[in-house]
Structures are given as C-alpha cells and as structure tokens.
Image (cartoon, grey):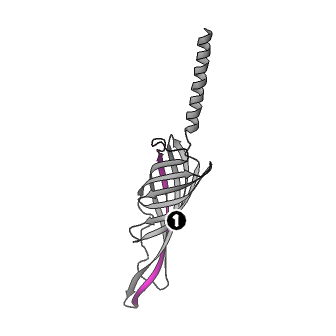
Amino acid sequence: MKKSIVSACAFLMLSGNLYAQQTAHQENYGNTLNLGVGVGYYGYVGHSTPVLHADYELSVGRNFTLAPFIAYYSYQNYSNWGDPNNPYRDYQYRETVVPIGIKGSWYFDRLVGAGPRWDFYLAGSLGFALTSTTWSDGYGGTTTLHDGPSPLFLDLHIGTEYHIAKKTGLFLDLSTGVSTFGLAVHF
C-alpha cells in the first residue's frame, strides 16, 4: 500500500512538471505592436513605393491572431495635359494612400520545431485604402485618379520573427502587396 501511494505521488508530480513545461512552451502571440518599413508594388503606380506599416496583434485562438493595421505611402508622378487654351505640358501630382484593414495570422513555429527565439506564420489581410491627390497649379484636367476608397483588397503573407529579447523581436513579412521589415514589441 505504501509503495502504491509513493508511486501515485511520483506520477502526479511528474505529470504536473510535464504540464508546466508544456504550458511554458505555449507562446502567446497576441498583445504585440509591429512597426515596419518596406516596399509595395501597386499596379497603377507602375513601380515599387516605400511604405510605413503598423499593426497590433490580438490573440483570438491557439496559434492565431487578428491585427488591425494601418499603413502609409505617398508617391509623386506626372500627367501630360492641355486644351485649346492651354499648351500641353507635364503637371505634377502627389498621391497619398492610407490602407486600413485587418490581418489574420496563423503561427506554425511549433509545427516545424523552431526554437523559442523564432516564430513563423502564414497570414492574410483584408482592407481598403483611403486616397488623397494634390495637383500642381494650373492643371485643368481630370483630378480624380481613383474613385474614393478602393474596393476591398486581399494580400497573402508569409513571415518570421526573431526574438532578440523577451519583449522585443525583429520581423520580416513577405506579402503579395507590401513587404515589411521591422520591430515587434510584446506587451
């Protein structure tokens, strides 16, 4: 009887210790502010454009987060315009675009056996873009490049984060729209 009690106690202690180790290994991916810089390619611009990006990840399930995001980019281009009263010439315009949306990320670092300093994820982001355009003086042509917010857009992502400390990391997010590199701050 005494041997059975000792065996049961040892089993419970080992089970508790194993559970504590497993629980400690489960990472909380939420409560993370990601600040990044990168480049994006937008078909109507015709070239890559520098982008600033920020999002805040919220944990909504095991290995899954949702992150509201906002980004910013601005570019300059020219349009040739003229009419019978104005000679044709190039007019400068600047377009500023602010994409807003939500990004869902699924973390698979445990699946690939990555160490505790690495996170790997697949993601998709859904959103729309607010735009503003200003033209140089004297331009009398059509001033609308796009009609208000764009239709919904969808980007696909694959990314990684390397934890340089418990509360900070560096991330690389490769996307079909905007790819960024930046700092992740965990709260």
Front residue (pair 120, 67): 120
Which residue does the image show at 43% across and 58% down from the upper left?
175
**Label 1: which residue?**
72
Which residue does the image show at 51% across and 48% down from the upper left?
119
Looking at numbered disc 1 in the image, what kind of residue is underneath it? Tyr
Q: Above or below — where is 13 with respect to 137?
A: above
From the top left corner, tell me how far across and down residue 129 is, in percent: 47, 63
From the top left corner, tell me how far across and down residue 111 is, in percent: 45, 41
From the top left corner, tell me how far across and down residue 32 is, in percent: 58, 50
Per the rendered image, the range of residues in magenta is 87-115
Q: Above or below — where is 123 with respect to 18?
A: below
Q: Above or below — where is 162 with respect to 41?
A: above
Whether residue 70 is in magenta: the answer is no
Disc 1 element:
strand
Quarter occupied by the N terminus: top right
**Residue at the limit of the structure toward the left, as seen here:** 84
